[in-house]
Image (tube, grey):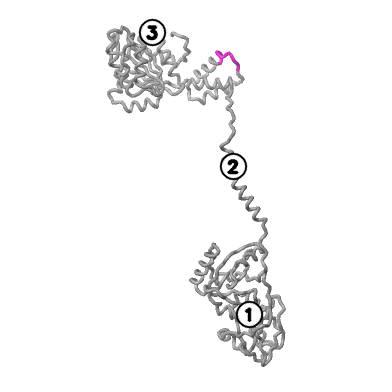
Amino acid sequence: MAGEQLLLPSQEALLHRLQHLACYGEQLVLLAGSQGAGKTVILTALANELEDYNLALVACPQYASAAEIRRKIVMQLLPDPLFDDDTSLVDTLLRFTPKLLKPIHILLDDADNLPLAVWAECLMLTQVICGGAAVTLTLTAKPEFVGQLLQQLPQQQRQWLLQLGIEPLSMAEREGLYQTLLTRSRQKTFTPRSIVVNQLEQQSGTPAEVLQLLDLALHGEAETPKEFPWRKLIQTALVVLPILAMGVWYMGKMRVPLPKQALPSLAITASSTLSLPEFLLDWLPPTLRPAATIAATSVGQWPWLAEVNTRVNVDETPSAAVSELLQDAAATADVTTAEVVTSDAATVEVTSVAHVASDSAAPISESSAASAVIAANVPSQKIETAAIAAALVLTLPTDGYTLQITSMKQQQSVAGQLSVLPKNEPFWLCRSGQWWVVLLGHFSTYKQAQQAAAKWQHQHGAAPWIRAWKDIQNYQPQAQP
């Protein structure tokens, strides 16, 4: 074999077959192999063997034009440089074949970069006779391209093409190539043979992979320069900075104390005489309907109490008729009240002054007002009228609807929430587990509650929750802290 090209046994056998086809074949030989399989090495060795042929060896670059490929081929085959590269190869060679005495063999490496027009011309060249023999061609391409090309060719032209594939190297050839290249490099490695064999077994069997493994054993992995991660740093900053800003803003807001609210105190004075409505008298049991006068004071702290002005005569009854409701009310409101004396002509006057001026709020239900009235046939003893007022405040209605304005866990936030309530609307402060709940208004129909909720949302921006009294009977009314 001419030249000093190193070939493996399988490559040399393939070279002999290609040489035989170049001398006696009448087809276009297409050598298919993957990247690094040794196509260029075999094609170069074939060109060195065909010394008696008029040869043209061309490496086809990517995106090369048809005229450029024709020019490279014709300039190697013809002694006369006067030709037109826009003319097809068939027409150009037919003009000069009488002057050519040797057979023509054309070798094109990386033929998958050829334009389709040149492929068609190469197939037609196999039917041209020059120097007493047919023009032969050997082309190399990747297996993927070969499959696509065969699908596009008609059945008749497929017969003009012979496909040959490069087989993977055996383990003996891989190890022999590795040791041969290592010996030629005149360097020593500290990689054990067992590790080298294991790495060779994991390869697909191309010479390029063996050469890459040897380079890794001799020089190690190439160090890639470390780049500063600007992109990751910017992305992290875009996420972290808004979170930190929100945290600083929230901590600053938490340090600002809530505004101190002037809490109204409970004041009880016997300043007016009021009369109970007749419907309350009808609600009381017969034993509790004697004429009486109940004196009490207006409670400025609870503006939702409807103004009650009643005067009732009380008949003399046994002292055992004292209502248990008085005792419960007295235990609820821990305040000292005025003394009430009962007799045949004695009167007890209850005064609770609060004005409900809102047009949207419905009047207090009969059950709520009735639970706020405590009248009894009482002997001469001290009755705590403030307890009665506390009972009025701390009793939840059982029918109708109300608006749940807010709920909070911190008791110190209650005063600030109560300060924004309208002074002419009834409200309740209740406990539900760990929560403080503020209820505003008492409405007999759901439509009235909706209107009041819309008005509140228009004024304050947040929509309240419409609640039915029957659904929140488990709430525990509380006095204002």
In front here: 424 or 405? 424
Q: Residue type at mark 3: give it.
A: Glu
Q: Residues within 10 Å of mark 2 (few under 14, many from 20)?
A: few
The image quarter containing residue 198 is top right
Mark-to-mark CA distance, 3 and 1? 128 Å
Magenta range is 182-188
Instruction: Name the side, left or right, on which 339 lies relative to 74.
Output: right
Residue 470: x percent and y percent? 55, 72
Mark-to-mark CA distance, 2 and 3? 69 Å
- Which of the two discs, 2 and 3, sits closer to the camera? 2
Say the numbered circle drawn on residue 228: none
Residue 146: x percent and y percent? 37, 25
Note whether 315 is above or below 235 in the view shown. below
Q: Residue type at mark 2: give it.
A: Ala
In front here: 130 or 189? 130
Residue that badge 2 annotates: 237
Mark-to-mark CA distance, 1 and 2? 63 Å
Q: Quarter holding the C terminus? A: bottom right
Mark positioned earlier in the residue sequence (3 or 1): 3
**CB under 8 Å between callouts 1 and 2?**
no
> Label 1's element?
loop
Does the stretch in magenta take in 429? no
Say the numbered circle drawn on residue 352: 1
Q: Is residue 432 visible?
A: no
Residue depicted at 33% across the width and 26% down the height:
150
Say the numbered circle drawn on residue 51: 3
Instruction: Name the side, left or right, on which 254 lies relative to 90.
Output: right
Residue depicted at 58% across the width and 13% down the height:
186
Q: Residues within 10 Å of mark 3 (few under 14, many from 20)?
A: few
Mark positioned earlier in the residue sequence (1 or 2): 2
